[in-house]
Image (cartoon, rainbow, N blue to C red):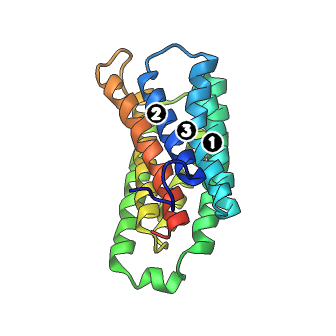
């Protein structure tokens, strides 16, 4: 059963299919050396989600956040600190758009504060994020500490503001996005070089990240 009207030949379903196929192909290229083809496949996965959101008349903020995430994917497909910082900046900008999107689309502060479950979720996210930052702080170079701290605060704000939404898929997507970033930071800064756990972590990072972006996209486009 297709998520959008029509079969696989429908534009929306076809775009989503090729996005998912790009994500799958990139998953099989994770251990390959950085190359233009590898960068293109990785970038296409979320860029096609941005195209899908645009085709379906989704919120401009959603399209922009997905497009910036695709730019971040392009940077992170390359090696080196400059590429990492470029990806960090692109994703930071994307998170800021997500925050604004969630705030304007979500319920009021009063409604949020009246839900013990949502408050508990927000507190759990805050404890996790600050615990992660405390763990990372002594392990990263001094020049990366401020950018990483700002990024952690941004993704925490993204996660908390998602809890104001009435779209369960979008909330789940934001949680998966946070989990993906936590695993990415663990793999990059906390694991010893050559650790066997790094192999499965790289796959988990990508699967959680793409699933998160897809759920946020479909949550808004399908109202779920």
The image shows a total of numbered marks equal to 3
Q: Earlier in the sequence, mark 3 or mark 2?
A: 3
Assess disc 3: are there few (<14), some (14-19) or many (≥20) residues with their C-alpha within 10 Å of its C-alpha.
many
**Which of the two residues, 218 or 105, is positioned nearer the viewer here?**
218
Secondary element under disc 2, as helix, strand or loop, is helix
Q: What residue is disc 3 on?
A: 45
Q: Residue 141 sits in which quadrant?
A: top right
Q: Residue at x 36, y 20 (%)?
A: 192
Circle nearer the viewer, 3 or 2: 3
**Whole-number angstrom distance, CA of label 1 to CA of label 2:** 35 Å
Which residue lies under the disc numbered 1?
Answer: 47
Q: Is residue 190 above or below residue 57?
A: above
The numbered mark, 1 or 2, whose residue comes first in the sequence reads 1
In the drawing, does residue 191 fall left or right of residue 212? left
Identify the element where label 3 is drawn. Answer: helix
In contact (CB < 8 Å): disc 3 and disc 1: yes
Q: CA distance from mark 3 to mark 1?
A: 6 Å
């Amino acid at each position: 059963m297709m998520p959008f009207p029509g079969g696989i030949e429908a534009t929306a379903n076809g775009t989503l299919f090729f996005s998912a196929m790009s994500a799958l192909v990139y998953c099989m290229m994770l251990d390959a050396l950085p190359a233009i083809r590898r960068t293109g496949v990785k970038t296409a996965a979320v860029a096609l989600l941005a195209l899908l959101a645009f085709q379906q008349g989704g919120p401009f903020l959603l399209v922009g956040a997905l497009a910036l995430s695709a730019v971040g994917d392009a940077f992170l497909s390359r090696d080196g600190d400059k590429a990492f910082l470029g990806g960090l900046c692109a994703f930071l900008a994307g998170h800021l758009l997500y925050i604004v999107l969630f705030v304007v689309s979500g319920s009021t502060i009063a409604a949020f504060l009246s839900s013990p479950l949502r408050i508990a979720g927000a507190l759990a996210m805050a404890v996790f994020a600050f615990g992660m930052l405390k763990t990372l702080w002594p392990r990263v170079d001094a020049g990366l500490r401020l950018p990483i701290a700002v990024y952690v605060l941004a993704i925490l704000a993204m996660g908390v503001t998602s809890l104001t939404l009435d779209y369960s898929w979008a909330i789940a997507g934001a949680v998966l996005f946070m989990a993906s970033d936590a695993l990415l930071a663990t793999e990059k800064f906390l694991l010893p070089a050559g650790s066997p756990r790094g192999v499965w972590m790289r796959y988990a990072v990508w699967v959680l990240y793409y699933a998160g972006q897809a759920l946020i996209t479909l949550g808004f486009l399908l109202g779920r």
